[in-house]
Image (cartoon, rainbow, N blue to C red):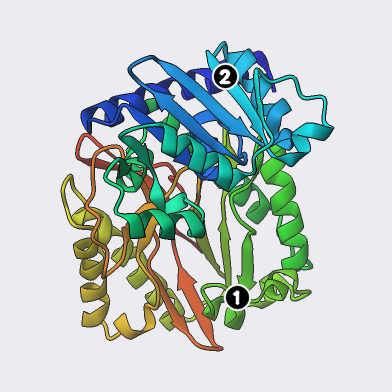
Amino acid sequence: MGEREKMFECELTREKLRHLEATLAANSVTRTLILGNRNIQYILGVESSGFFYMDLDSKSYSVYVAPIDYGKLLKIIEDCGLSFEIVVYGKLTELTSVTATRVYPNDYNALLRQIISEDRNIGVNMDALPYELRSEYSRSNDEKIKDISAIISQVRALKTEKEKQAIKKSSEITEKAVLQTINEIDDETTVREFKSKLIRNLYMNGAESLAFEPIVVVDGDASYPHPPESSSASGRKIKSSSLFLIDVGAKKHSYSSDMTRIVLYSSSNRLNELAEFLEYTYWVAVDKISEGAPCRDVDLEARRYLSRLGLDKYFIHSLGHGVGIEVHEPPYISPFSKDTFSDNNVFTIEPGIYFRNRLGLRVENTLVLEKNRVESFMNSSLVIR
């Protein structure tokens, strides 16, 4: 990683910490335990075991990790000049040369019990507690523990400026690689070869990793939203098919993107008509999005449009989802969602229609709601003809 990227990631970490601190303070939470490897990744930029302790009154911060993760977290803390203490726990501490300021031979659950019992009025994201402890504290109705699961979810759903920049970069890498690889298709290119080239192009354009295993399918294999993995390793020639679907996302600075495109090789009027209907469904949904709009209403608006065409029964998944550290996170855009749209949400809109064993069509962009306006991080045609 170059110095400029390292500087960006340190600024990203500091900005998120300020966002986290401000949100906790606004909810009168001064001491908290934040659990979950993805939440640690949100705070420090790398996925890690353990948990994070914050005391806003004393401005003290501690990261509790197993020995296996000590080195990479120490490097980030030193590189970014963060005043964090690293505490190493677990039975392996007795067999290693880790030189943390504090070392606990206790296992994960025992250490959590100890910290919670010693601290009054602590906030804990209970949804990430081990089942044994969650059941234990739920039964006891311990009023000194405040469940901050919803607060942590809110923090991660409302992206900072640097987070949006990271997702924009991830999206640019994804879109560039997809278009580049489509342009490399010739008469002999197979699905398997395309996927291999696509992954290569993602990394060559700057991806750190894949947000998920790319879906690359043709014709009947596209009729399943999540097709068998073998479908993306097919030896079928792409240009011999009617329809080619690509669903892929890169990660950059630990942030995901998600994009789906369909490429039409058939001159079938019906297939082109279905693709046009789907493109319009996407725009119907986007036009419905605004600050405070219920996510379920946006999903249902897309279904109402498809219903007028007799196609709603073929739309068999949710309309979209939030994107960030994880490729699927709040807000969730489904007919049953209780989420609402807020400024600084980053999310996908991905309508699809599927005719079992025949074909499937889906289009998708990663978007941001900013100052009550929806902007897409991807700008290419949803359907490529």
Asked if 19 appears above or below 233 in the picture, the reply is above
7 to the left or right of 66:
left
Identity, as a three-letter code, of the amino acid under mark 1: Pro
Identity, as a three-letter code, of the amino acid under mark 2: Glu
Give the residue at x 57% y 44%: 110
User: In which quadrant will I find the N terminus?
Assistant: top right
Give the residue at x 64% y 66%: 216
Give the image location of residue 252, x and y in percent: 58, 36
For the residues bearing labels 1 and 2, Cβ distance under 8 angstroms: no
Dot 2 falls on a residue whose secondary structure is strand
Residue that numbered label 1 is attached to: 227
User: Which is nearer the eye, 84 or 313?
Assistant: 84
Dot 1 falls on a residue whose secondary structure is loop
Give the image location of residue 353, x and y in percent: 41, 77
Give the residue at x 26% y 82%: 309
User: Which is nearer the eye, 291 or 241?
Assistant: 291
Hey, which residue is sitting farthest bottom in the picture? Answer: 357
Residue that numbered label 2 is attached to: 85
Give the residue at x 54% y 46%: 175
